[in-house]
DNA sequence: GTGTGAAGCAAGTAGGTACTTGCATACACA
DNA sequence: TGTGTATGCAAGTACCTACTTGCTTCACAC
């Protein structure tokens, strides 16, 4: 075998391997042997580096996704349809990527409370971002004022999560992947009483309240 | 000690215990010993009755919820707000009840394909029921005709699932339990361009298209 | 009675799991 | 040249896991 390309530090290798294995098999199924094999590292190294399996998995969840920039909505809405579609599409993709990891974490929250923070980290951000954005739309007269903002945000967030998490289980109920985001946004705009979608298919009826 | 109340057949006891333990710990965490203890039955009995742990868990999922009657929406819509609120409230409750079981099943679908049917059983029913109902509303002039019915159904279903599954993790983003159903329905009615909610708070603005 | 079938109990098998220990190697830097 | 520091390897510990076997007990049916 000679000496393989093992110049890099093993800590990163182990973390990445652990993330993959945990995403596939959950906490109990992610055995230290599996993780070590996946990382191409001796099992002992894993314990020397992280102390215990629990500590390793905690490190995985703590570090996960701290590299990618935060996606947000503009402070001054110009084209809600475009802005929201970008936002929704981006989050759909992100949540889809972390689906297995997220599902296992959520199902294990009762047993392993340390997973709680990870399970709801992104959630709050999305909800709050949407909520604030709707309020700005209202202020600009781009959304109806009698809308229950919180409920609207819950519904859009739920739709993103649901699509990202359940599409592969029940694919036929969801719109095609490439148009899903804009379809959700179009429905959402209607829900918050916004003028009909700008660019594409400017729906003829229900012109816009007020 | 003496002889406890163990007149009934142990099959049911084991099934119920297995459902509880599986809901708490998932497949790998639901050890035969735990299940047997929970059922107050000897571990050997479990194997004699079901053959293997996998067979037992499959039996649990196959039999689960086959007792309760199907909840549906009326063929001829009269009061969409009331009808939908009842429907949504009922399903919220049902999904909440089976949340742990459902979460584990969904997170394990990749590893144990036999769990797939269970993971999406209720889902399709809810989606189809809502879809058909919206179409009837449209036919009766109670919903706008240019609405994307599928997308609307996806969003309502997603909201139900999300509330039932994530409320205990992120409680503060959801509306209070007792009013959640009607709030979702009110937003949904707006989304499908239905006349504003009947009974309570007949929202003044955006009267109803057409 | 005498089966018969459902259940318990004790013990064992074969393997997996987290984690430890002791020792050998290799490179890095002083 | 020496001295860490990081890693590998082999082996071992203590426990858990699904599943089996052999034997006993008890209730009920004929």
Image: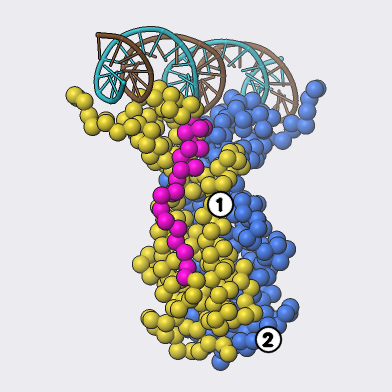
Chain colours: A yellow, B blue, C cyan, D brown
Magenta stretch in the rendered image: A53-74
Q: Where does the image place residue B52, in percent across and percent down from the top left?
A: 51, 32
Answer with left or right where residue A40 lies relative to residue A67.
Answer: left
Whether residue B105 is visible, yes or no, is: no
Depth check: B206 or B20 in front? B206
Q: Where does the image place residue A114, in percent across and percent down from the top left?
A: 58, 40
The relative height of residue B33 versus residue C25 in the rendered view (above or below) is below
Asked if the stretch drawn in magenta spans residue A60, the answer is yes
Q: Where does the image place residue D7, in percent across and percent down from the top left?
A: 33, 24
Whether residue B178 is visible, yes or no, is: yes
The residue under the point 31% across, 30% down is A40
The residue under the point 49% across, 42% down is A62
The relative height of residue D14 versus residue A153 in the rendered view (above or below) is above
Q: Which residue is mark 2?
A: B204
Residue density around tag 2, few if under 14, some if 14–19, many if 20 or more, within 10 Å: few
Tell me the SS state at disc 1. Answer: helix
Q: Which residue is mark 1?
A: A120
Q: Where does the image place residue A125, in percent across and percent down from the top left?
A: 53, 59
Tell me the SS state at disc 2. Answer: loop
Count all numbered tags in the image, as a single digit: 2
Name the subunit of mark 2.
B
């Amino acid at each position: 075998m000679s000496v393989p390309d093992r110049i890099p530090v093993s800590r990163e290798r182990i973390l990445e391997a652990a993330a993959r294995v945990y995403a596939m098999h959950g906490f109990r199924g992610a055995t230290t042997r599996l993780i070590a094999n996946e990382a191409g590292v001796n099992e002992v190294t894993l314990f020397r580096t992280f102390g215990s399996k629990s500590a390793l998995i905690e490190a995985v969840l703590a570090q996960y996704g701290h590299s990618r920039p935060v996606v947000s909505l503009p402070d001054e809405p110009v084209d809600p349809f475009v802005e929201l579609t970008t936002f929704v599409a981006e989050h759909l993709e992100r949540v889809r990527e972390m689906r297995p990891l997220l599902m296992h974490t959520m199902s294990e929250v009762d047993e392993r409370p340390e997973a709680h923070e990870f399970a709801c980290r992104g959630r709050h951000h999305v909800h709050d971002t949407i909520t604030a954005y709707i309020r700005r739309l209202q202020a600009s007269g781009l959304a109806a004022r009698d809308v229950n903002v919180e409920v609207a945000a819950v519904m859009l967030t739920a739709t993103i999560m649901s699509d990202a998490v359940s599409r592969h289980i029940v694919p036929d109920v969801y719109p095609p992947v490439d148009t899903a985001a804009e379809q959700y946004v179009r429905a959402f705009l209607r829900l918050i009483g916004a003028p009909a979608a700008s660019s594409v298919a400017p729906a003829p009826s229900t012109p816009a309240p007020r």
